[in-house]
Image (cartoon, rainbow, N blue to C red):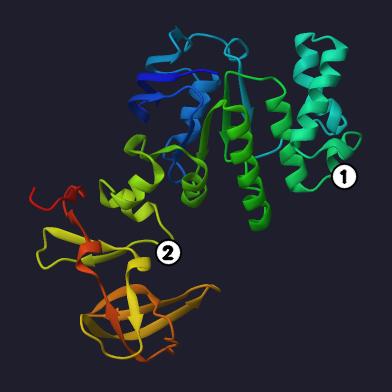
């Protein structure tokens, strides 16, 4: 395992800056996620750690060892990709064993390690199968097993669950969480899925155009966003963005904090329903409210129809204010 440190690590492709100089330390044994939209630089950053790409400037350290000039094989990291990258002609057992065979590990030790990993990942009955005989979730478990069998200093995971359906993503998310708790290997994970990032990680860094927009524990970043980009990126349904009383201010409120009532009540104002989105446990109501689009959650017992007049309750203490020009969060008393 390793503590991973970036010292003004940056990447350019010709004249284009892909990653601004980054200063960051990931703790030994931490599960850390870079999350952001496509093109924000998260996969490039993972490639810098793996040694697939070389930084344009700055330094990368594993513990106190500088590694940015080392070849990928000398860094002792294991990568898990969005595509499973399994050898189709090899069995599950041989796919898992492959990194150990390349190292020249004795046969008895290989068999012992493959059996250990297969037991952990629920693959013991599948060791003789070929990848084409497996489901997507099983293939991803094999890819994880091939990484886990090496006992690397760090796991690097690049959108590993993106090709799975919704149910399998949830199952594999639980699997990854259990594996990390059991083995404590430093893990750097990249994803565009903010829900996945918050569910898995001890800390997250939200990337925007190659820069860290905010870094911290998931619940802290969600509840206390530093800027409009972070507030809009984290949360589902996404943040309501509203015009403030002043043109210099933009307001934001999360749909989960907005209650939509069927009847008038103190503190609620009238709105007209334009869209309904039932999701099972919640009914999300989009309404025309004071000439602006506002989404909220139907209060218990409320079942409005499109075109109905409803009454929207927006708690003032749950409203964020942002500077229109810089998009930075405005704090009370600041």
Q: Residue at x 37, y 35 (%)?
A: 210
Relative to 284, 150 lies left or right: right
Above or below 68: residue 17: below
* Disc 1 to disc 2: CB gap under 8 Å: no
Question: How many dots with numbers?
Answer: 2
Residue 111 on image: x %, y %: 86, 20
Q: Which residue is mark 2?
A: 237
Classify 10 Å Cα crowding around label 2: few (below 14), some (14-19), many (20 and above).
Answer: some
**Quadrant assignment for the N terminus:** top right
**The quadrant where residue 96 appears:** top right
Q: Residue at x 66, y 50 (%)?
A: 171
Q: Tag 2 or tag 1, which sits nearer the N-term?
A: 1
Give SS at disc 2. Answer: loop
What's the distance in space between the residues labelled 1 and 2, CA to CA? 37 Å
Q: Residue at x 17, y 55 (%)?
A: 324
Residue furthest out toward the front: 182
* Observer-nearest of 313 and 205: 313
Residue 137 on image: x %, y %: 73, 46
Residue 254 on image: x %, y %: 33, 63
Give SS at disc 1. Answer: helix
Q: Which residue is mark 1?
A: 133
Residue 73 on image: x %, y %: 63, 13
Above or below 191: residue 97: above
Q: Residue at x 76, y 29 (%)?
A: 117
Above or below 73: residue 114: below
Q: Any mark on residue 172, and which?
A: none
Classify 10 Å Cα crowding around label 1: few (below 14), some (14-19), many (20 and above).
Answer: few
* Observer-nearest of 228 and 278: 278
């Amino acid at each position: 395992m390793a503590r991973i440190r970036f010292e003004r690590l940056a990447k350019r492709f010709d004249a284009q800056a892909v990653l601004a100089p980054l200063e960051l330390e990931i703790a030994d044994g931490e599960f850390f996620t870079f999350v952001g939209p496509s093109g924000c630089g998260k996969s490039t950053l993972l490639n810098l750690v793996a040694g697939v790409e070389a930084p344009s400037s700055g330094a990368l350290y594993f513990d106190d060892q500088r590694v940015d000039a080392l070849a990928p094989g000398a860094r002792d990291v294991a990568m898990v990709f969005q595509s499973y990258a399994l050898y189709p002609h090899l069995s599950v057992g041989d796919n898992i064993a492959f990194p150990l065979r390349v190292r020249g590990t004795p046969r008895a030790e290989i068999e012992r390690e493959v059996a250990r990993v297969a037991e952990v990942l629920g693959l013991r009955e599948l060791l003789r199968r070929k990848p084409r005989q497996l489901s997507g979730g099983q293939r991803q478990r094999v890819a994880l097993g091939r990484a886990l069998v090496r006992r690397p200093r760090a796991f690097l995971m690049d959108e590993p669950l993106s090709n799975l359906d919704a149910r399998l993503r949830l199952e594999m998310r639980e699997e990854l969480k259990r594996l990390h708790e059991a083995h404590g290997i430093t893990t750097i994970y990249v994803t565009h899925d903010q829900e996945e990032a918050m569910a898995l990680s001890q800390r997250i860094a939200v990337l925007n155009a190659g820069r860290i927009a905010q870094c911290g524990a998931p619940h802290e970043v969600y509840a206390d966003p530093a800027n409009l980009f972070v507030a809009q990126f984290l949360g589902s349904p996404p943040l309501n963005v509203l015009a403030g009383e002043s043109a210099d201010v933009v307001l934001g409120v999360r749909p989960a904090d907005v209650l939509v009532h069927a009847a008038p009540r103190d503190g609620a104002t009238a709105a007209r329903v334009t869209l309904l989105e039932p999701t099972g446990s919640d009914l999300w109501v989009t309404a025309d409210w004071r000439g602006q689009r506002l989404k909220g959650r139907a209060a218990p017992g409320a079942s409005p129809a499109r075109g109905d007049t409803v009454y929207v309750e927006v708690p003032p203490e749950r409203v964020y204010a942002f500077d229109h020009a810089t998009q930075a969060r405005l704090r009370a008393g600041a």
